[in-house]
Image (spheres, rainbow, N blue to C red):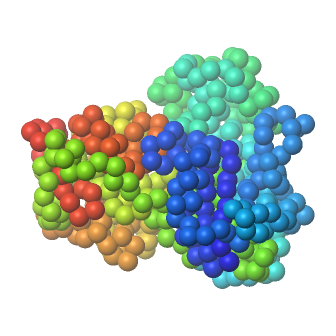
């Protein structure tokens, strides 16, 4: 059965599942489109190019049209976890009869996590969906029935970022100053916090925000002018302290419910945009409540098209599981030929030892291989790579990406060596957990609090990247590199030659690897300290 699924709204995505296998998942933001963008005609056309015939089922993930409850929902709508809201019917596409399917946005999170997890079909588990609007625990039974156990907190994701908007003088007052990018910045700033008791002012603000319903509508920024943190500046030490305490208070509300109600020792699946918070993921792993915790690489809304397709597969075939690969995004687009590249770059065959030597000497290389990653994290197919040993390299990479200086740079590491460098055992292929750094020489990838967000790589997962790490280990003694996403500011991953060339030249990157060719910018001087300390 061929199931084509569309997710409307922000993080718009189109995905195809065929006979239980994820064929592709194309997110509208990829190919240098704006981050978090709605489902675009380009994504739809890209998906159509990959299909050799019409689907058997067309899915529409449930969504909302706006803030007003009188507006009709898109498809099955946003809220609802059981099967009562499923809409199924028939239509025609290009002259062929097809079945139609829609289920709620809430179910898309639940079914994406279940379908992509390593749990066997029918294995019961708990699930947590926490995102901008939903914050609830569920249990999934052997017959794949979903029951909500507890609605813990309304708007957890929105409430998490709310204090960033409050403290940032540049944020507007409408909708609480919400920006999708606030959450990632918050996660970085919590690492700078001092270990001080919660003050009365901090407590009052945190409890006020967590107790508000529909936070973006009920607590606009100007309504919180009474707080001493209003426009205090996000890089002030006072805000950094508040950020960590606010983050922990939000997590603790969910933990208290889990300790009270999730007592049967089942695995936990995590979905929703809050599943990108590495600190919280690590705390769930260490809570001792669950024998296993699984977070998919696309826990945010970029995984919703997959989730609705899994739901449709379950509805029509009774099967809940899919096979998938994190590199299921679009193929790279070669829209410029050798003559345009050679105008600025010298070309040579890729020799991994040569590339490792360049990286060890302080060069920064864009690294492009195969199909794009799904989800928001660069995992070695659309990456900027660099040596991990100098503080200055972190600063240079943030300058290249036009990011704030407080943002950390993540490492990518040989899976077999991970315990040598980080407090971690086994794979962590999707960069979803924090680990304490054991190797003091990894200064560029060690955050101020001594942690990193490491990605492990095995030969089976990504052979060429694994081989590059092995070659880098031969040169430096450590199979670890800086790995940050290859993208223009505010855009999804670069996915075509013209954008790649323009970005490398504009941002002072030393060169790029495209499949099995190495291109070095002509007459580029080394921009950072050579070698390792």
Q: Is residue 63 visible?
A: yes
In percent of width and height, residue 321 lies at 65, 77
User: Residue 511: x percent and y percent?
Assistant: 20, 47
The furthest residue to the front: 95
Residue ID at (61%, 70%): 53
In the displayed structure image, the side of residue 500 where residue 264 appears, left or right = right
Who's the residue at 19% across and 56% down the image?
Answer: 518
Foreground of the two, 86 or 118: 86
Seen in the image, is 154 located left or right of residue 199?
A: right
Give the vertical position of 65 relative to 497 (above or below).
above
The mark total stands at: 0
Q: Position of residue 163 (x, y in %)?
A: 62, 31
Question: Can residue 269 be seen here?
Answer: no
> Residue 369: x percent and y percent?
33, 61
Does 302 appear above or below 498? below
Task: Please give the name of the residue rendered at 55% of the width and 24% of the height, measured from the top-left corner.
Answer: 168
Q: In which quarter of the image is the N terminus?
A: bottom right
Residue 347 found in image quarter: bottom left
Query: Quick one: 76 or 463, which is closer to the camera?
Result: 76
Relative to 458, is 229 above or below? above
Which residue is drawn at the image coordinates 48% and 49% (left, top)?
A: 30
């Amino acid at each position: 059965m061929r199931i084509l699924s569309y997710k409307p709204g922000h993080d718009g995505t189109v995905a195809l599942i065929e006979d239980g296998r994820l064929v592709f998942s194309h997110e509208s933001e990829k190919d240098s489109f704006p981050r978090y963008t709605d489902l675009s005609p380009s994504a739809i056309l890209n998906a159509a190019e990959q299909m050799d015939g019409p689907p058997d089922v067309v899915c529409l993930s449930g969504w909302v049209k706006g803030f007003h409850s009188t507006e009709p929902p898109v498809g099955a709508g946003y809220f609802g976890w059981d099967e009562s809201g499923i809409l199924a019917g028939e239509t025609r596409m290009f002259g062929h009869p097809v079945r139609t399917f829609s289920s709620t946005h809430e179910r898309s999170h639940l079914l994406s996590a279940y379908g992509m997890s390593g749990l066997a079909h029918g294995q019961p588990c708990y699930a947590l969906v926490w995102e901008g609007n939903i914050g609830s625990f569920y249990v999934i039974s052997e017959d794949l029935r979903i029951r909500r156990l507890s609605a813990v907190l309304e708007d957890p994701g929105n409430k998490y970022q709310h204090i960033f908007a409050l403290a940032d003088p540049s944020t507007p007052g409408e909708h609480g100053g919400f920006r999708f990018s606030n959450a990632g910045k918050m996660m970085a700033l919590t690492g700078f916090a001092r270990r001080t008791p919660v003050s009365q002012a901090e407590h009052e603000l945190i409890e006020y925000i967590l107790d508000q319903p529909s936070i973006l509508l009920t607590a606009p920024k100007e309504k919180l002018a009474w707080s001493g943190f209003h426009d205090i500046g996000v890089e002030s030490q006072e805000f950094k302290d508040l950020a960590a305490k606010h983050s922990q208070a939000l997590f603790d509300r969910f933990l208290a419910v889990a300790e009270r109600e999730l007592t049967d020792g089942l695995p936990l699946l995590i979905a929703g945009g809050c599943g990108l918070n590495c600190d919280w993921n690590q705390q769930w792993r260490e809570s001792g409540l669950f024998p296993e915790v699984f977070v998919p690489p696309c826990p945010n809304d970029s995984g919703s098209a997959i989730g609705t397709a899994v739901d449709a597969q379950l509805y029509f075939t009774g099967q809940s599981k899919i096979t998938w690969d994190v590199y299921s995004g679009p193929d790279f687009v070669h829209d410029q030929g050798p003559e345009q590249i050679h105008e600025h770059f010298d070309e040579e065959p890729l020799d991994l030892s040569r590339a490792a030597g360049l990286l060890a000497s302080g060069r920064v290389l864009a690294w492009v291989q195969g199909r794009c990653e799904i989800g928001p994290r660069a995992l070695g197919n659309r990456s900027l790579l660099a040596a991990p040993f100098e503080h200055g390299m972190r600063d240079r990479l943030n300058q290249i990406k036009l990011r704030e200086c407080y943002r950390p740079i993540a490492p990518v590491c040989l899976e077999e060596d991970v315990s040598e460098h980080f407090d971690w055992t086994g794979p962590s292929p999707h960069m979803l957990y924090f680990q304490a750094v054991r190797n003091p020489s990894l200064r560029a990838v060690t955050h101020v609090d001594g942690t990193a967000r490491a990605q492990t790589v095995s030969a089976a997962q990504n052979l060429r990247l694994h081989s590059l790490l092995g070659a880098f280990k031969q040169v430096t003694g450590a199979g670890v590199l800086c790995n940050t996403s290859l993208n223009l500011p505010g855009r999804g991953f670069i996915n075509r030659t013209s954008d790649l060339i323009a970005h490398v030249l504009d941002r002072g990157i030393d060169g790029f690897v495209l499949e099995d060719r190495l291109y070095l910018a002509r007459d580029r001087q080394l921009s950072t300290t050579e070698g390792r300390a």
